[in-house]
Image: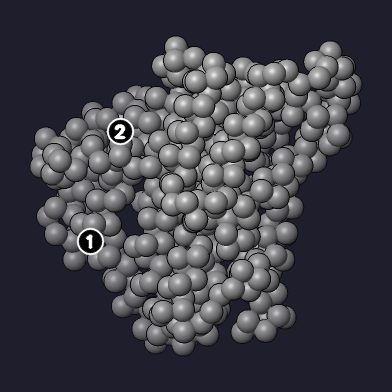
Amino acid sequence: MVLAPGALLYFLPWPGFSEAQRHLVAVFLATILALVVQPMAMGACVLVAMTLLAVTGTVPANRVLLGFSNQTVWLIFSAYLFARAVSSTGLGMRVAYELIARFATTPLRLGYAVVAAGMVVAPFVPSDTARGGSVVFPVTRSLALAFGSEPGETARRMGSFLMLVCFHGNYLASAVFLTSMVANPLMAQMAMKIGGVEITWLGWLAGSCVPAAVAGLAVPYCISRWHAPELTETGPARELAVGRLREMGAMSGAERGLVVILGMVMLGWVTSPWHGVGNAYVALVGICAQLVTGLLRWEELVGETKAWDVLLWFAPLIMMADELNAGGAVKVGSEALFGRLAGMGWLAGLVVLVLVYLYVHYVFASMTAQVTALYPAFLTAALALGAPPLVAALPLGYFSNLNAGLTPYGTGSAPVFYGSGYVGEGEWWRIGFLVSLVNVVVWLGVGGIWWKVIGIW
């Protein structure tokens, strides 16, 4: 009964879709519906869907398990193990207490501080998953625990608010810099080939800096109104943090060892364009270093249930999203849209294209996958409407990052933050949609005015 809605979806009219595409789309949409309603655990719903695709022949058996070979899946898995090490060594609590002691005059200000910390490293870590999962998330979780907020009854005390703020701040950082998400330079290359326009590092930043600053202030504030933390008086927490730091004393050998490993992993991510080792494998080197030095025991790795749970439900979703693209279902849907835009003015048409490009991410489990599949087509459509090349290329580029907040699977860092258990499924989807509306207003409204001021159009 988990995917029963798929039977109804299958019989709806699907103009232009083949039999195989209809079946795949129906199973995918039914899976998403099941994830929202949650008749069973998230992993169980996805496992049923994956098995159904295999036994019905909708997806060839040799491709059904390909999601487990995706590097992003293993980068997410590694992020959980880094978070465990940050917690078990005490390094996370030390960083959390320092942040609380210095910035926690209000919960919102504390959220701003962690978002700003992630923004500082963003230009040097071109991976939303690596940055969010291995840098921002461990600190966020430690902050929540420092306030006595754990998944369950005490989640709303502080933890759920911090998880939402820091997650949405993390992918915002991906939109700010050309080097803060791996697909950003790819889009710059596409813009040159398709539109003949050069997007430099400073040019990307010039277009993003003002709307990003406004969004960086607006989004955490809005979340504090939509999902307010129960704990509003942070004075006692600051006093507690100062006392705990005094008790902890100097950094232990384990903490220093973990700092060295994390620093080397960060360096590996920054220099990946030169040495050619993927981010996932750099992270796995860090995990191996923890195992060899004893910072992480094999029993702890095997017992990290949240890491294994995410591995089991995220990999099949990536497989389904890839099959939708490879099977042509996404292309058929987007081509149907472009035909309806004929005769529309370029400005109105560009707004429609950006909005569709944003919300079509509901069927993608990777920002890079959407860029590869749709960015060239949407950019070409915008240029055909008469949009200036830079005005067409940049908004689609920024929203290739901002779309990540819609779902618990829309980017590699999403399963990490969502999988912490602080925020329920329905609330995650609700906040994600509301934040997307804020981003639309800020980036197309404030951003549009700013782009006019600096002469982009």
On screen, residue 193 versus residue 232, left or right, reads left
Q: Amino acid at mark 1?
A: Gly
Q: Residue at x 74, y 28 (%)?
A: 96
On screen, residue 154 versus residue 28, left or right, reads right
- Give the tally of numbered discs: 2
Up/down of 203 relative to 316, above or below: below
Per the rendering, the mark at residue 46 is: 2
Please tell me whether mark 2 sits on a helix, a strand or a loop.
helix
Per the rendering, the mark at residue 308 is: none
Residue to which mark 1 is pinned: 328
Q: Amino acid at mark 2?
A: Val
**In the figure, residue 71 lies in which quadrant?**
top left
Q: Residue at x 43, y 47 (%)?
A: 277
Counting other residues with Cα less than 10 Å from the Cα at mark 1, is it few (<14), some (14-19), or many (20 or more)? some
Dots 2, 1 in contact, CB < 8 A: no
Q: Position of residue 280 (x, y in %)?
A: 44, 40
Can residue 144 be spotted in the picture? no
Q: Position of residue 211 (x, y in %)?
A: 68, 64
Q: Position of residue 386 (x, y in %)?
A: 46, 87
Q: Residue at x 51, y 43 (%)?
A: 129
Up/down of 217 relative to 299, above or below: below
Q: CA distance from mark 2 to mark 1?
A: 22 Å
Up/down of 99 relative to 245, above or below: below
Work out which quarter of the rendered image holds the C terminus and state it.
bottom right
On screen, residue 333 versus residue 41, left or right, reads left
Along the line of sight, which residue is nearer the eye, 330 or 1? Answer: 330
